[in-house]
Amino acid sequence: MSVTPPSDRVLSTLNPDGSRFWIRPRLSPGRFLNRRRVVAYGLIALFVLLPRIRIGGRPAFLIDLVTREISIAGAVFRPSDGFLLMLLGLTVVLTVFFVTALWGRIWCGWGCPQTVYLEHVFRPIERLWEGNPSEQRKLDNATLPSWRRIGKWVTYAVLAFAVANVFLAYFVRTDQLEHWVTHSPADHPVGFGIVVFVTALMFFDFTYFREQTCIVACPYGRLQSVMYDKQSLIIGYDTARGEPRGKPAKKSLPVVGEAERKGDCVDCGACVTTCPTGIDIRAGLQMECVGCAQCIDACDHVMDKLERPRGLIRYTSQDELAGKPRKIWRVRTFVYPILLAVVGALFVWQLGTRTATEVWVLRPAGPTFFDLGDGKVAAQVRIKLENKTHVTRVYQVELVEADVGTLRTPMKSWTLEPGKAAELPLFVDAARSIFVHGQHKVHLRISDDHGWHRTLPINLVGPDGGP
């Protein structure tokens, strides 16, 4: 059975027969490339340093999967901080929506680690080893890998190891990570395996998968249709100015008539050959466009040579391309910052008023009370404490209504390290007669050695001896 090939290319990285089309973009020097380089190398320095900067004795940013803690700028979030984490997540989502509504995919082209490492580290090394795109394609067609490609792979492997360590530093403490790297794998086979696995993942990504991470795997490009409107900043081709495209006529030839008029686009293809995702920006806004501005630099260079004004391809909006004015402030650019301010303020307030110790009253395990004889019962109470500070604390519990009964505890005090929690099994010995309809309300005072205290109302459950 024969299969009819698609009339159009489905993906820029696929040939019509389904095989991989390797994108070998031509570098286009220009004003935006220079600016992106400054931003990219600054971000790489930030990526490396951020997990190593200490604020309050903790990493500036760490998602510790082992202890289930997230450290951000000295603040620690644990699973018990569910509401705070929800507010933090909402803050991030609203920020993404707001930034996208204003500046489109500025993150993809300028700040995303995938783009930063691929376009400013791995591709330059590729050009260093293999030459320009034409020379790279000759190596693609060779039967066996040449020494130049092998040299690139070896360099990529070393860089993948470095990038893997930078990546892991956001999930594993840097001292632990350095121990994994500098000591024998036999001392830490699991840690060694994680480093090897992530290194292999980075090597696969930057050697083989490359721009397909943006085109196929990343959901952000697919969500842009929801987050964009016609006023959002995009990289666009000015069709009215550029069409009909065609080769420029020689200056010595006279213009015959209006029918022979050409647009400013000379159909040189520079914007296509320089695109890192292999698209033709002249076909309009596309999901694959990461907003890197390489097509702008390429087109500006051509316009300069032809002594025509720059901006045939430029940062613009869909409305501007249609001849309408740009509006920065519109419904979504009002709503998003208002929501962001509300959620952000609530997050800061919750964070600032967060208690040093979290206390929960748990349901008693087993019988709620025991008969002690002599008209007394032992009512069971279970509470849970979590030390949310950065220092070890010693906790004590006492019964406020000492005349009602006696508090029995298995320990005089409980010592909790930072971030640790403990359940405290307690009993209140009291007379049967104090219970009304099987309940009696008392108060427990919980305090620590740093001056923190909290009084907790507790409903003791006992025999139904009341009126």
Image (cartoon, rainbow, N blue to C red):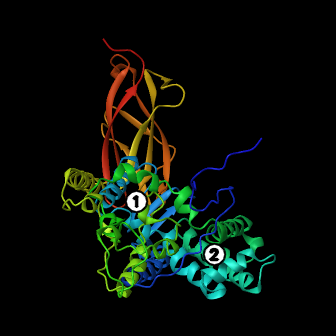
Instruction: Please tell me whether residue 191 is drawn above or below residue 119 in the rendered image.
Output: above
Instruction: Please tell me whether residue 34 is drawn above or below residue 370 in the rendered image.
Output: below
The x and y percentages for residue 247 are 43, 76
| Image mark for residue 160 | 2
**Which of pointers 1 and 2 lies earlier in the amino acid sequence?**
2
User: Pointer 1: what residue?
Assistant: 284
Q: Visible in this render: residue 382?
A: yes
The x and y percentages for residue 418 are 46, 61
Amino acid type at mark 1: Gly
The x and y percentages for residue 361 are 41, 38
The x and y percentages for residue 202 are 63, 69
**Dot 2, crowdedness within 10 Å: few (<14), some or many (≥20)?**
many
Q: Quadrant of residue 33?
A: bottom left
Front in this rendered view, residue 225 or 204: 225
Amino acid type at mark 2: Ala
Q: Visible in this render: residue 391?
A: no
Q: Quadrant of residue 123?
A: bottom right
| Image mark for residue 382 | none
How far apart are labels 1 and 2 at the CA level? Answer: 35 Å
Instruction: Please tell me whether residue 14 is drawn above or below residue 142 in the rendered image.
Output: above
SS category of the residue bearing label 2 = helix
Q: Quadrant of the N terminus?
A: top right
